[in-house]
Image: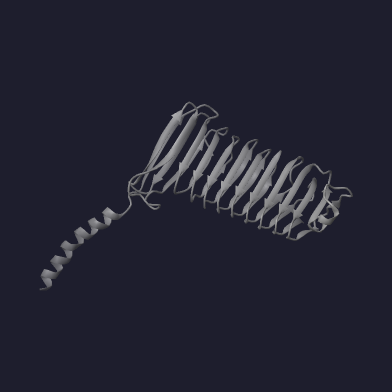
Amino acid sequence: MKKIMKTWQRTAVVPVLALVSALAPAQSKQEKRVATGPKPIVSVMNQYGPVSVHPGAANQVVITYILASNKVEVDQHQTGERILFETHLLPGSTPQTGRVEYEVFVPVEAAVVVHSSDGPILVEKLRGDVSVEGATAQVQVREISGAHVHIKTLSGPVNITSVQDGHVEVTSISGDVLLSAVSGPLVDVNSASGKITYDGNFGGSGNYKLSSHTGDIEADLTPDTSMDFTAKSMMGLIDTGQFPIDPKTHSAFAPQQRGRVVVGTAGKAGSSVLINTFSGKIRVKKH
């Protein structure tokens, strides 16, 4: 009897292992290389999974990607200097089996467009325009210079670091937005309920607008900050006690608004700064 049981156990292992192997996702790593000019427009559209973009060779785009299963593939389309890599979900795919992990290397002056619903997304060290869109995806953009940066999220947090001479626009429904060492002719950030944090000095000249409906806004400024400053909140508190702001004797706001408006200057008033909330708290402090 014992001999029969051992024989059955050995023969039963084979179909069980075969079943497990059939159910397990078949991950595979692949690579594509595309010859380009120095300023291609590179788009990556991904439903599920991370996308990271880095500087690479001057006239070449290299993309590596990992497919979570055989239920997903990557399509490539090219028209001149426009290159699109797009996740193609096959019948029966799910958020798990349809996941693709992208890593992309582009010329440093390439324009980049990235979409990923659940990310995360990273774009770094480029001099071309950057456009990023996500839903819950965490977005990081860092070390970009002389370019337009446009970011849209639903609830994903946004972290922008070391963007110089940039035209920066960020829109989020509920995601927190952190800007560190970000300067340029135009910086416009809007989050309906997320917290907005600015860490830096608002550059030497430019227009900066930080707006939230219910979220708090905090500016942590360096001592050399130079700005023409206005903070407005319909129902929230405004605290500028930790940063020296010289009040203006004349402003465009009626006297009855003064309880929720702070208008003043710092340094030579180089940049125009407007911080605006409906019910969130505004706090300005010094490093």
Q: Is residue 287 visible?
A: no
Quadrant that contains the N terminus: bottom left
Q: Residue at x 60, y 44 (%)?
A: 142
In the image, taking residue 109 as reference, residue 25 lies left or right, namely: left
Q: How many marks?
A: 0
Q: Is residue 59 above or below residue 191?
A: above
- Residue 104, percent from left and from top: 48, 39
- Specify the color scheme: one colour
Residue 85, quarter of picture: top left
- Residue 105, percent from left and from top: 50, 37
- Residue 141, percent from left and from top: 59, 45
In the image, taking residue 83 as reference, residue 157 lies left or right, namely: right
Which of the two residues, 185 or 1, is positioned nearer the viewer here?
Answer: 185
Residue 239, quarter of picture: bottom right
In the image, taking residue 24 as reference, residue 162 lies left or right, namely: right
Which of the two residues, 70 or 194, is positioned nearer the viewer here?
Answer: 194
Q: Residue at x 71, y 59 (%)?
A: 281
- Residue 52, percent from left and from top: 51, 44
Q: Residue at x 34, y 44 (%)?
A: 90
Q: Is residue 215 above or below residue 93?
A: below
In the image, taking residue 247 as reference, residue 134 lies left or right, namely: left
Which of the two residues, 241 or 60, is positioned nearer the viewer here?
Answer: 241
Quadrant that contains the C terminus: bottom right
Q: Is residue 271 visible?
A: yes
